[in-house]
Image: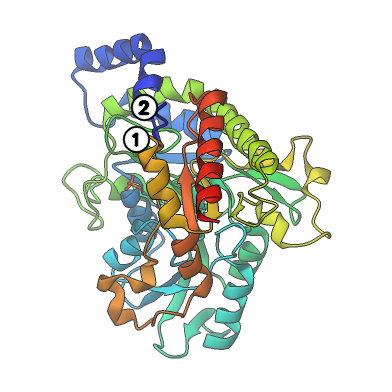
Amino acid sequence: MKVPLLDLQLQYRNIKDEIRQAVEEVLESQQFILGPKVEALERALADYCGCAHAVGVSSGTDALTIALMSAGIGPGHGVITTPFSFFATAGSIVRVGARPFFVDIDPLSYTMSPQALEVFVEDDCRFDSGAGRLIDRQTGLAISAIIPVHLYGQCADMDPILALARRYELTVIEDAAQAIGADYPSLADRKVSRAGSMGDLGCFSFYPSKNLGGFGDGGMVTTRDEALADRMKILRGHGAKPKYQHQFVGGNFRLDALQAAVLLVKLKYLESWTTRRRENASCYGSLFRQSGLIGKGLIIVPKAVYESQGSEYNPEALSPVPPAFFHIYNQYIIRAQHRDDLRTHLAQQGIGTEIYYPLPLHQQECFRDLGYPRGDFPESEKAAAETLALPVYPELGHLQLEYVIDKMSEFYRSVL
Ligand SMILES: *Cc1c(COP(=O)(O)O)cnc(C)c1O
């Protein structure tokens, strides 16, 4: 049996005719950049994400870049994020001339630890209340924004992050590249909110392996602020409005009509795919429990954000939906003992896995001058060494999931 980490050919086979027709329409129109398909996608995705505005852009990376630019973040500014994410989160901060300030993750959810955030702000920064600015003591830079990452498809713990951002007048940019359609049960607001609708700006990616993936690169930024949306629409076309009159230096961050046409077709199926991912995740959970691997402490299955917060937190009170269903499982991530040997064994048995991400951002060569030694973010470093992504894509069958668990049990029997 073969169980690849992701099989997009299966998905394509099911929607081939519709996709081909949508692509054909664009080919007939010969309008390839922005235009009606992109506008239709923006409308549909703004609704889907529960946000007033959506701006289609050229990638998830460019979504982060243009979000930062639209918020006026550049040289002299600092942006807080975690070192356990895809590179683009921190890369885009540096690309606009700002400096990333890392805070560690929560070990259960792998998303930004609100406690670590609080400690950084209280211990390493001072608030200049006259100027309404949070200043990093060591560098003297003004901290302007926070980028929480909704890693693997689960929202970061936004209540405390948003409260802190309000207190210190920080812009919040959600990196929702992996989390389209994920929900967050907010105790503060007494309601469930969607990824990308809680901060000032929400950034999404349509990279093919994301839950809503295009046939190439693509991305989107959501916001409830019309002025920010308008500015991003100008910035994505080199800051020109009207044509050839440049108000700002932007860039070419435009989305293709072909991508929008494909994504509009796929969007119709997104909820059903997400349901299948959740069923697969829940099935893994039962199979892992039955296998005894959890009981023996050999592996740890994904945990919900609120499980870090103890008993006072009761998301069931907010929603008829089981709280496990807030996650969209772009990745199903386990913590595993003997992770690297396990991965080799699974590969030999035809099972695809991946490590997201093997080297935390503060340890990357290009960020050496930020001066974070190894050991500064122990939870991120531990997660990088222990976590593994298992196949969870919608088209997986029950037998394949059982095969994955069987082969894992086999591995642990052989090493123990
Ligand atoms: C995929 C991803 C991005 C970047 O998206 P691209 O479309 O590949 O540029 C940014 N942040 C996170 C967390 C991602 O997973």
Q: 352 or 54: which is nearer to us?
A: 352
Quadrant, the N terminus: top left
User: Eyeballing the image, is 12 above or below 54?
Assistant: above
Q: Is residue 277 visible?
A: yes
Q: 174 or 332: which is nearer to us?
A: 332
Number of numbered discs present? 2
Q: 162 or 119: which is nearer to us?
A: 119
User: Eyeballing the image, is 55 above or below 400?
Assistant: below
The residue under label 2 is which amino acid type?
Answer: Leu
In the rendered image, residue 401, in percent from the top left (x then y), is placed at 54, 31
Residue at (49, 26) in percent of width and height: 396
The residue under label 1 is which amino acid type?
Answer: Pro
In the rendered image, residue 282, in percent from the top left (x then y), is placed at 65, 36
Q: Residues within 10 Å of mark 2 (few under 14, many from 20)?
A: few
Q: Is residue 354 visible?
A: no
* Distance of label 2 from label 1 (alpha carbons): 8 Å
Label of residue 8 in the image: 2
Label 1 near label 2: C-beta < 8 Å? yes
Quarter occupied by residue 78: bottom left
User: Eyeballing the image, is 383 above or below 315?
Assistant: below
Helix, strand or loop status at disc 1: loop
- For discs 2 and 1, the disc positioned in front in the rendered view: 2
Label of residue 208 in the image: 1
